Image (cartoon, rainbow, N blue to C red):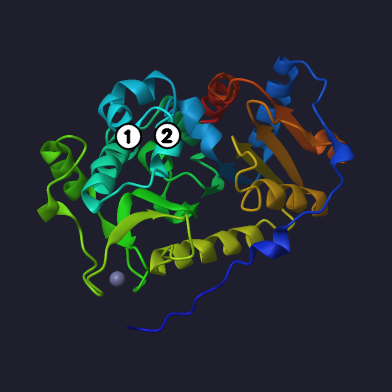
Amino acid sequence: MKQRQIKKTDWSQFLSGVSAGDYIFQNVPYEEQIEQASALISEADVILIGAGAGASAAAGLTYSGERFTNNFKEFIEKYGSMYMTDMYAAGFYPFPSQEAKWGYWSKHSLLNRFLPPALPLYKQLYEMVKEREYFVLTTNVDHQFQKAGFLAERIFATQGDYGNIQCEKGCHPKIYDAEDLFRQMDQARSDCLIPSHMVPKCPVCGGNMTMHLRCDNYFVEDENWHEAAGRYGDFLRGMEGKKGVLLELGVGFNTPTIIRFPFEKMVREHKNLSLIRLNMNEAVVPESFGNRAIGIGGDMAKAVSDLHRQMIPAALAEN
Ligand SMILES: [Zn+2]
């Protein structure tokens, strides 16, 4: 294989270490926050979006409740409601066979990755930034940013994609598009199992395949992944001295070292940057950021829609 120059992104240089006492829930009326946030975005030269699980949940891809129990009734009955509590937990179920594993994942992938259209929350986000210099860093694996129109070369999806599979042992740095396979599995599934002849095997080592999701040290970071990491690094360097907004959406404390902590560190160290944090229950922001931080709690779908409404008429008027 051709050797490529690969730029490594080192998360540790973005890690933050700030005392918890600095964090506050802002005591500013919601309407005022929306106004301030839309002004910040409108006036920004560069916009860095960071999105976590909360964004897709707010957009409608909820992993629990009826969306789970209606779609996975058969699985809940077969494996037990104690383990099959929601799609997140179900993904970690120790399926007893490859037929059972792919029986589950083909359904999970179709439901969250291939069947949903671009959802309104993502489309509104896109309209808000499409004419601007933007970049998306996301831990989400559902492809919503791409579907909504965000350019693939401006997205770094660090944790994989429900649409791809890889060697379970990561024996070679390649991932494989599994859409057709998952659709065939979905048709052939019976009693939560897929037929044995459909079980994918690694074309290099002959071993089992697995979803392209970061869950252990075997996660494959292929050429595209490294190129996206490099472009993210370039974008960060390009923000130097520019008026920038870091728009953080639904990032909790599952993997805060990828988006949440680095975003805070960047805003702390660069006075030209502001942070807008949208988060259902955890919209705390460092008080020391002053008016360079806006933490909007509650329903993010509403907040994005309100931001969109504030911003789009202005954008249209410019043309
Ligand atoms: Zn292999």
Q: Residue at x 71, y 17 (%)?
A: 30
For the residue carrying disc 2, how many other residues have a C-alpha within 10 Å: few (<14), some (14-19), or many (20+)?
some
Q: Quadrant of residue 302?
A: top right
- Which sits in the foreground, 81 or 13? 81
Q: Could you tell me which quadrant the N terminus lies in? A: bottom left
Disc 2 secondary structure class: loop
Mark 1 Cβ inside 8 Å of ligand 1: no
Disc 1 secondary structure class: helix
Q: Quadrant of ligand 1?
A: bottom left
- Which numbered disc covers residue 13? none
The reply to whether residue 170 is in sight is: yes
Residue 223 at what x, y percent from top left? Answer: 40, 69
For the residue carrying disc 1, how many other residues have a C-alpha within 10 Å: few (<14), some (14-19), or many (20+)?
some
Q: Which residue is mark 2?
A: 83
Mark 2 Cβ inside 8 Å of ligand 1: no
- Which numbered disc covers residue 79? 1
The answer for how far apart the CA atoms under marks 1 and 2 are is 7 Å
Residue 250 at what x, y percent from top left? Answer: 59, 34
Residue 65 at what x, y percent from top left? Answer: 43, 21
Identify which amino acid the numbered label 2 is placed on.
Tyr
Please state the total of marks drawn on the protein image.
2
